[in-house]
């Protein structure tokens, strides 16, 4: 019977050769391909990296000493968190500036209609808007349409006087008040969102000496 595993002269046993291993050794590219996953189900996102940093205990403020002792990959995660925070702040500032600009542009348009609103206020004081008349209906529709654009009136009799919101055109001493108080509103003030469109012109009652 023929020996299929002959022993060499030095006495070492010859191991059987795996044909698959021999083929893989002869083809390095196939060996590399076999070590790679067949498919990549999900692409790594920024949030995945940040979640990994949180899992590793890097969430929150990190001092300089800790950064110095951190592994290089952790330093990259910390840098990524800082960049993400800066981008989030940039988006908030951009959105806030966009809203302010929108209010400014809307205000520029509405300013043209303020004299009309002032006329309606005077007509209302004289009783011209009482009853179910075409004039009162038009006035109501105009005020409603303007309010939908964000226009809000302010300035009422009896309110405390505010130098930031009210313009005093006349002061009248009064024993009935202890602080400066609006006695009468000559022109209504208006705001659009957080933007002051026009200060209210008022008569102010001041404490009598």
Image (tube, rainbow, N blue to C red):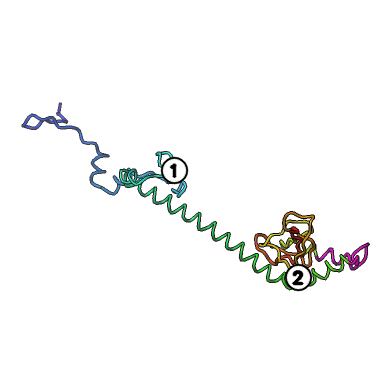
Q: Residue at x 57, y 62 (%)?
A: 97
Residue 52: which quarter of the image? top left
Residue at image mark 2: 114
Q: Position of residue 164 (x, y in %)?
A: 66, 62
Q: Position of residue 104 (x, y in %)?
A: 64, 67
C-alpha distance separating marks 2 and 1: 51 Å
Horizontal arrangement in the rendering, residue 18 relative to residue 55 (left or right): left
Say what secondary structure mark 2 lies in: helix
140 drawn magenta = yes
How packed mark 2 is, by other alpha carbons closer than 10 Å (few <14, some 14-19, many 20 or more), is some
Q: Position of residue 200 (x, y in %)?
A: 73, 65
Residue 206: which quarter of the image? bottom right
Q: Is residue 12 above or below residue 58?
A: above
Horizontal arrangement in the rendering, residue 158 relative to residue 130 (left or right): left
Q: Nearer the viewer, mark 2 or mark 1?
A: 2
Q: Residue at x 93, y 65 (%)?
A: 133
Q: Residue at x 32, y 47 (%)?
A: 72
Q: Is residue 7 above or below residue 85?
A: above
Residue nearest the viewer, comparing 30 with 45 = 45
67 drawn magenta = no
Q: Residue at x 8, y 29 (%)?
A: 11
- Tell me the quadrant of the picture where the N terminus can be found: top left
Residue nearest the viewer, comparing 113 with 69 = 113
Q: Which residues are magenta?
A: 126-142
Residue at image mark 1: 60
Q: Residue furthest left?
A: 9
Q: Residue furthest top?
A: 1
Question: Which badge, 2 or 1, is on the more N-terminal residue?
Answer: 1
């Amino acid at each position: 019977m023929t020996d299929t595993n002959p022993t060499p002269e030095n006495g070492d046993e010859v191991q059987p050769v795996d044909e698959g291993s021999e083929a893989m050794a002869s083809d390095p590219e196939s060996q590399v391909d076999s070590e790679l996953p067949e498919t990549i189900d999900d692409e790594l996102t920024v949030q995945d990296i940040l979640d990994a940093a949180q899992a590793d205990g890097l969430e929150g403020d990190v001092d300089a000493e800790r950064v110095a002792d951190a592994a290089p990959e952790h330093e990259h995660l910390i840098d990524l968190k800082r960049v993400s925070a800066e981008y989030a702040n940039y988006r908030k500032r951009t959105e806030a500036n966009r809203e302010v600009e929108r209010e400014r542009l809307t205000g520029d348009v509405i300013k043209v209609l303020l004299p009309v609103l002032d006329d309606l206020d005077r007509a209302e004081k004289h009783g011209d808007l009482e009853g179910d008349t075409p004039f009162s209906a038009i006035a109501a529709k105009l005020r409603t349409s303007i309010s939908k654009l964000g226009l809000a009136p302010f300035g009422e009799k009896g309110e405390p006087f505010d130098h930031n919101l009210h313009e005093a055109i006349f002061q009248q001493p009064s024993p009935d008040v202890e602080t400066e108080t609006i006695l009468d509103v000559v022109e209504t003030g208006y705001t659009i969102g957080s933007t002051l469109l026009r200060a209210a012109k008022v008569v102010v009652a001041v404490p009598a000496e």
